[in-house]
Image (cartoon, rainbow, N blue to C red):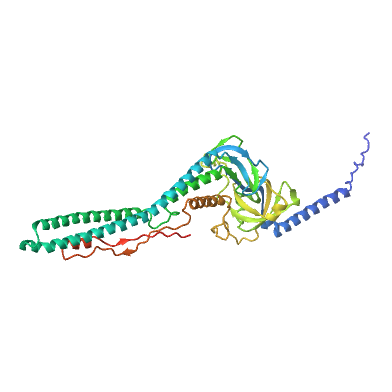
Amino acid sequence: MNAPASNTTAPVTAAPAGNPKRRTALTAIAVAVLVIGGGYGIYYWMTGRHSESTDNAYVQANVVQITAQAGGTVIAIQADDTDYVKAGQLLVRLDPADSRVALDQAEAALAQTVRETRILYANNSTLQAQIDARQADATRAAADLSRAQDDVNRRAPLVQSGAVGKEEFDHSTQQLASYKSAYTAAKSALDAAREQLNSNQTQTDGTNVADHPNVLRAAAKVREAWLAVQRANVPAPVSGTVARRSVQVGQRVQAGVPLMSVVTLDNPWVDANFKEGQLERLRIGQPATLEADVYGKHVIYHGKVEGLGAGTGAAFSLLPAQNATGNWIKVVQRVPVRISLDPKEVAQNALRVGLSMTVTVNVADENGLTVSDTPRTKAQGAVASTTVFDSMQHDADAEVARIIAANGGGRAKVQATAEPQAASAPTASADGAAKVASADAPATRHHHHRKQS
């Protein structure tokens, strides 16, 4: 017999109830994500979209290279690495023995030149006195010639009548010839004296002892030697911290050889290397906030954009990229942007060259220039300057003036002035010889020398 079929079926398992804690956690995470996303969206809309940031930024400052202005042997080093020095402070001393010998020679040559130049001016008076003497001789000779000519003219008609003897007339004629020769000699001596005075005056006209070309040439040699002595001491041109000292005592250095560097840390700046895609909204003058890795986020610096680089860093690198090759791969380029810093903030929290910085530039105001195309004005002044070396030239000028004054040159202005003086020969009879004598005695010039303090 067949067994009766069973009507029973397998029981159905009911779905387990959900985990309320898990559901709460997931909901909280979702809400947190939405809140964070919304908050970031609000932040980006209000602030984030108006800023450009980079952590590829580094502190820079003027690194002044100290070089020798003259060659010599180092005998002392007055500053070392990490030392703070002030402008004008002595850094390195060179042996000045050779340059001092050259200075002594130049000073002696200047003194001798001043004395020789004074002789030139004194000769003007001597030569003028000689002209006056020669003029008197010529005048006397012209008078004797005129008197002899009159004697011959009176005796000539009387020879025919026998009133005057032939011997007496010949004697008068010979005396006339003698006076003509004496007059010619006196006239030649007068002309020679005038030429000597003119020759001497070409070396003295329009100048004085202190400004004479010979004195100026010798004075230039003194200044050159004086500067060589002063340059044996190498001063700091600016105030700053000494770095990269390479000079050693006893080392023989030549002019232009680097000895050390002085870094001016009181006015640094930051070179922020922004990606090329970030440059679109960067403008000159936009404000920036900066953080230094050495201080962390609790120290904030403020600055502004001073300028944009003229090219990318790769373009100005020592080995620029050759992008025309076949294995070219595009790399996002960066452009250096200079950010100035507030000197007061830098004084409170000092920076060092090369420190890493994080820079955030507020680009909300895009009215500025993309590059600084305005030239530097006189009001802005020089980028960097020093007055340390000005005193060297001033002291050299003072030494030159002292030597000139000590040797009689001083600031005395010696010059020759011309004054006409009528000194013609006495007029004789209408005879041609007397007329020549009168015409050959022109006016002479008297030259007076004046000293003005």
Q: Is residue 422 above or below residue 55?
A: below
| Residue closer to the observer: 167 or 415 | 167
Query: Residue most toward the left?
Result: 161
Relative horizontal placement of residue 65, taking residue 35 as reference (left or right): left
Q: Is residue 218 visible?
A: yes
The percent position of residue 101, horizontal first and vertical second, equals 51, 40
- Residue at x 21% of width, y 59% of height: 144
- Residue 350, above or below 165: above
In the rendered image, the quadrant that contains the N terminus is top right
- Residue at point 32%, 64% (across, down): 420
Q: Position of residue 93 (x, y in %)?
A: 60, 41
Could you say which is closer to the camera, residue 241 or residue 202?
202
User: Residue 148's spot in the image, x, y percent?
Assistant: 17, 60
Residue 331 seen in render: no
- Identify which residue is drawn at 52% across, 44% down: 228
> What residue is drawn where x is 22% and y is 56%?
183
- Tell which of 227 and 31 is nearer to you: 227
Determine which quarter of the picture holds residue 280.
bottom right
Residue 39 location, x and y as percent? 76, 56
Closer to the camera in the image, 6 or 238: 238
Instruction: Tell whether 188 sits left or right of 221.
Output: left
Q: How many marks?
A: 0
